[in-house]
Image: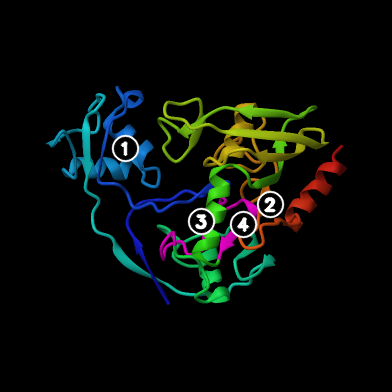
Amino acid sequence: MQTICKNTAETVETEGELLLSDAPAGEFRVLKEEEGQRLDVLLASRYEAYTRSYLQSLIKNGSVTVNDKPVKSGQKMTEADQVRIAFPPVHELDVQPENIPLDILYEDDDLIIVNKPKGMVVHPAAGHSSGTLVNALLFHCKDSLSGINGVLRPGIVHRIDQNTTGSLIVCKNDRAHQAVAAQLKEHSITRKYRAIVHGRLTEDGTVNAPIGRHPQRRKEMAVNVPGGKEAITHYHVLETFSQFTYVECQLKTGRTHQIRVHMKSIGHPVLGDDVYGPAKCPFPGLQGQTLHAMTIGLIHPGTGKYLEGEAPLLDYFKKLMTKLRLQM
């Protein structure tokens, strides 16, 4: 049995995002580029694991001060303002190992690469205390998982969205975790995705547009918003259908929902995406976006040699491709 700490914060799954310890700092000074932002907006950009409404509740009950004075959510920030935030104590939640089958692409004493199925959350979070990849890993690996990200995310160094399938690296010891995290931070890990997008793309391209939290819809991300971080996606056309295109997307960076947001920004949202795509999906019953992390490659932390894992497309994806070809 593993014990984790949980609070009311929500977490977001990401396409290859590097995970570091998310214990929030208690105070910070407002930077020049943050001047003029509302307090709640600033906190939401600083503490992305927390919803804006949750942070507003902390402001309302006096858990947040600016220059040692209680303030309101709409308070406009000035450069060098001292912000202090007191997060409430967490309570414990037992996370049990669960005998959930894993599709293992590679495994040794340092790391394991798995093919994550659609619908599976990577690690426990609010509303997902069981049935996660971590629950399955605790059963399969026993105590052989890195502890850098704490008991909430043992072995997890990056993650992909709940309804995104495909290859994911899990580290079995802290040495491997640090080495893989360094490669992710340097953007040197190979990450190639397959996706079906709306519309007909006729040539390859690159989307270079910073991504940040949407200013109104806090559970969504958007391009070219204040505080956005560099985000680069290369896409390559594999096959064109009558109304859709099959593409390979390679990540240069790994921001939250990066591929989904970038493809929407150029007018080609991922098919089945119920957040960034059309309100009505043309294929009823499709569970979330048709996005698959096919290839992941890295320098092995033990051998120093290049290692690549490839997750084959799932049956639902292949059947949908066949259906699209028949419609031509």
Q: Secondary structure at mark 4?
A: strand
Q: Which residues are magenta?
A: 148-171
Residue 87 seen in the figure:
yes
Sequence-wise first label, 4 or 1: 1
Are there few (<14), some (14-19), or many (20+) residues within 10 Å of tag 3? some
Give the image quarter of residue 37: top left
The kind of residue tagged 4 is: Leu
The vertical placement of 101 against 54, above or below, is below
Sequence-wise first label, 3 or 4: 4
Indicate which disc residue 122 carries: none
Q: Are marks 4 and 2 in contact (CB under 8 Å)?
A: no
Q: Secondary structure at mark 1?
A: helix
Q: Nearer the viewer, mark 2 or mark 3?
A: 3
Indicate which disc residue 178 carries: 3
Sequence-wise first label, 2 or 1: 1
x, y (%) of residue 58?
Answer: 23, 44
The vertical placement of 118 against 24, above or below, is below
Residue at 22% from the left image edge and 29% from the top image edge? 81
Indicate which disc residue 297 carries: 2
Q: Report which residue position mark 4 lands on.
A: 168
x, y (%) of residue 217?
Answer: 43, 35
Q: Secondary structure at mark 3?
A: helix
Residue at 36% from the left image edge and 44% from the top image edge? 51
Q: Report which residue position mark 1 lands on.
A: 43
The kind of residue tagged 1 is: Leu
Q: Are marks 1 and 3 in contact (CB under 8 Å)?
A: no
In the image, 321: left or right of 298? right
In the image, 225: left or right of 93? right
The kind of residue tagged 2 is: Gly
Are there few (<14), some (14-19), or many (20+) residues within 10 Å of tag 4? many
Quadrant showing the N terminus: bottom left
